[in-house]
Amino acid sequence: MTDEVKVHHEKQWEQIEVLGLLDARKVVEVSAPEKLTDGHTKPKRFIKELDNPSIKHYINRKESPVRNICEDFTTREDAIKMFDKLLWDSWHACDAMEKPAREWFADRVKEYKHGNNIDLICDCRRFRGNDAGLGLTNLKHPDDCHGYTLKKYIEFLADNSNDSR
Ligand SMILES: [Zn+2]
């Protein structure tokens, strides 16, 4: 009999995830505490690693062609908005992307279409604050990061390069 009532919650990971420095893809299972027959209580929350590891990219290191260069001259929040504008309104709209950044995106699109999981890891935050339900959003766990602009752009490029049928 497998129809035991379980409060079961598994986070769905996307193919591209934007992570903080200390984040990792994990499956957290939450179930109602159960009294086992031997008197022990089954833990409420346990974590297991994912089966297929993802390709990690550190997106804000000095040598990264897609680091947020706007951070050098303004606040974190403004820098994220500026980077988004820079990428879409200038790099993309005016076809003004430097070669290293262009190649970086091309490589990510390849990985993406290959079916690889991609982690974009940024050092602008230790943990991200956008895991639904965790309620972690605060200064230390901010929601935003220029990595989301990168993720969107990779997905955009992949969606728009499907003509090779
Ligand atoms: Zn960031």
Image (cartoon, grey):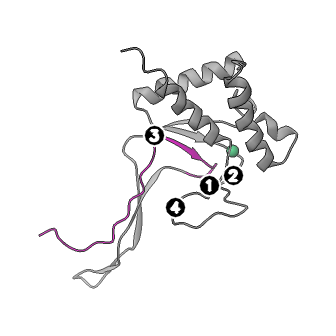
Q: Quadrant of the C terminus?
A: top left
Q: CA distance from mark 2 to mark 3?
A: 21 Å
Q: Is residue 115 magenta?
A: no
Sooner in the amino-acid sequence: mark 1 or mark 3:
3
Instruction: List the residue tagged with mark 3.
Output: 15
The verdict on label 2 being within 8 Å of ligand 1 is yes
Instruction: List the residue tagged with mark 1.
Output: 128
Circles 4, 2 touching at the beta carbon (< 8 Å): no
Residue 107 placement (x, y as % from top left): 54, 22
Q: CA distance from mark 2 to mark 1?
A: 7 Å
Q: Is residue 95 above or below residue 132?
A: above
The verdict on label 3 being within 8 Å of ligand 1 is no
Instruction: List the residue tagged with mark 2.
Output: 125
Q: Secondary structure at mark 4?
A: loop
Instruction: List the residue tagged with mark 4.
Output: 132
Residue 108 at least partly seen: yes
